Amino acid sequence: RDREGGRPLDITVKTLDAAGFVATQENGYSKF
């Protein structure tokens, strides 16, 4: 439903979430 809806908010949240996830992954690797 969300994907078919194509709401701008959903896209923005997805993009921010993806960026945050990548940053967290990078930090995790650095710590390890």
Image (cartoon, helix red, strand yellow):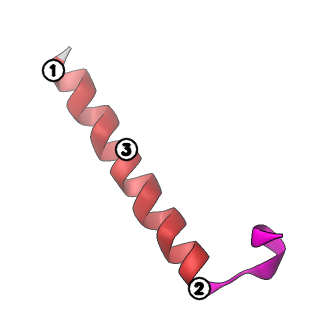
Horizontal side of 19 relative to 1 (left or right) equals left
Amino acid residing under circle 1: Lys
- Can you tell which quarter of the image residue 19 is in? bottom left
Of helix, strand and loop, which one carries label 1?
Answer: helix
Q: Residue furthest top?
A: 32
- Residues shaded magenta: 1-8
Along the polypeptide, which appears first: circle 2 or circle 1? 2
Relative image position of residue 7 (x, y in whole percent): 67, 84
Q: Which residue is mark 3?
A: 22
Q: Pointers 2 and 1 in contact (CB under 8 A)?
A: no
SS label for mark 2? helix
* Label of residue 8 in the image: 2
Q: Alpha-carbon distance for marks 2 and 1? A: 35 Å
Give the class, few, some or many, for how many residues have Cα within 10 Å of label 2's Cα (few <14, many ≥20).
few
Q: Give whichever of discs 1 and 3 has the lower sequence position.
A: 3
The kind of residue on which mark 3 rests is: Val
Q: Position of residue 12 (x, y in %)?
A: 49, 75
Q: Residue furthest bottom?
A: 8
Q: Is residue 9 left or right of residue 21?
A: right
Can you identify the residue that label 1 sits on?
31
Q: Quadrant of residue 3?
A: bottom right
